[in-house]
Image: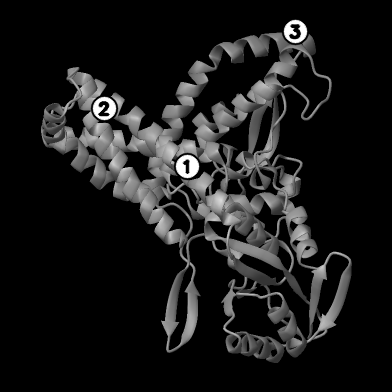
Amino acid sequence: MNPRAIRHIIFASDLVWIVFSAIAAYMLKTSAPWNELQFGTAFRNSMFLMTAAGIAWVFIFHRMKLDGFYGGCDLPAVMSKLFTGVVTLIVLIASAGFLLRENTSRLLLFDFAVMTLVLTFAGRVVARAVARRFSGSGRRHRVLILGKGRVAQALAERIHQHPEMRWELVGFLFPTANDSVEAVPDAGRASQLNSLQIEPLLKNKDIDELIVTSPIPDQGEILNLVANCHHRNIRVSVVPNLYQLYVSRPTLLDVDGVPLLRMGEGRPNVTQSVLKRTVDLALGSAFLLAGLPVFMIGSLVLWMQKGRALVSEKRCGCNGRVFRMYRFNVERRAKGLAGMERLLQMLSFTELPQLVNVLKGEMSLVGPRPEPVERVKRYSDWQRQRLCCKPGVTGLAQVHGLREENSSEDKAYYDLRYIQDWSLLSDLSLILQTIWTITRRVMSEAPASFDVSQTGETPTEFIELAHADRS
């Protein structure tokens, strides 16, 4: 089934769950018997709730990409996004009720929110299970990637994460500097082929689509290859050159048949910046107040053990501005810690003092993690785009398992993606995902890998198996 059709079905089912949840919440509130007459009464009396929720969900669903497939196979991320979306839905319904003088009880809204969250999450779990169940049955869309490196592997990772697309990655064709293409049908053998020699390979492998992810030295060769693909009814897709430089969603322009990708501005506007700062102050103060007992006890124990509770490190913030980032005096990545130091490290409370940096305006709750000055000096111009916003206590790269020891380039891909898709709702979702990550770490006493997207690893094994199965 077409992925777009699946998303439409999920959205339609969400509207059904909203109607059911509104009626069920009314029935629970009134303690009415569950019969046909009472269902009709509940339907009429819940008309405002159903209408307001349905209209608001159209905006929330598409703005937050709540289909359950966007972002790969990460159920905690799906739950956190849905939770944020449902909370936003309740706020919008309450606001609409206040303006239109519709009296909706808080208990009814609470029951409605809980049922909507449970039903929509269950619907996505079922949809993903069905997609995985049928992804291997029947004939799938067989894809060959022309290119190698980060872009090609990122595309392979996304194919692996989206079973609903029913794509099968057959392998890679590696462009070389010798105006030819290196075909690697399996992990142990390589051969040089030109575009005409590739044609039998495409036929033997029964390829449906060729995806070009990197430029070919000889443009004539690639044009001949594309022509041969069209002759064999093989679809050709192209990943735009330097797509990873975009810090916002590009728009496609057609200038008399010449396609142009226009890059928009990725930085938040003044209104968004003020809103983000307001949320930082509100939530930062709440988190600091909630963590005050840990802050005081941890400071006292570390001061008694080491003579110093806090340390500060020079980091680069927004636009490269240097500031001092606070943290508890616990050695990073140290082995064999015990007592309070081990507890602070396991809970990631070593970073709790950075809430002070948030209140001072040097950091934000969510954003790219700040890095040392010496490391920033070695940034490429592309990596410097990370500095266009305030650094965060947590961020998209950290949710996906990247830490300080990972390269700046690896983190930059996630950080620029965060900047590209920034919204207040995405910030709230990432905070929830961070809480879930810490909770899971406490329960298992070690970070667990849900899938390749959380570990930062590329699906090398998957690709090798694709070659091996077809060789």
Numbered marks: total = 3
Q: What residue type is labelled 2?
A: Leu
Q: Height in image: 3 above or below 437?
A: below
Which one is earlier in the sequence, the residue at label 1 or at label 2? 2
Q: How far apart are marks 2 and 3 (CA)?
A: 49 Å
Question: In percent of the image, x 76 and y 55: which residue is there?
Answer: 460
Above-or-below relation of 216 to 159: below
Q: Mark 1 points at which residue?
A: 126
Where residue 243 appears, as percent x and y from the top left, is 59, 67
Give the distance between the C-alpha atoms of the residues marked 1 and 2, in whole angstroms.
26 Å
Residue linked to disc 3? 304
- For numbered disc 1, what is the local secondary structure? helix
Residue located beneath label 2 in the image? 109
**Within 10 Å of the Cα at label 1, are there few (<14), some (14-19), or many (20+) other Cα atoms?**
few
Q: Mark 3–mark 1 contact, CB under 8 Å? A: no
Looking at the image, is 22 positioned above or below residue 243?
above
The picture quadrant where one finds residue 54 is top left
Amino acid type, callout 3: Met
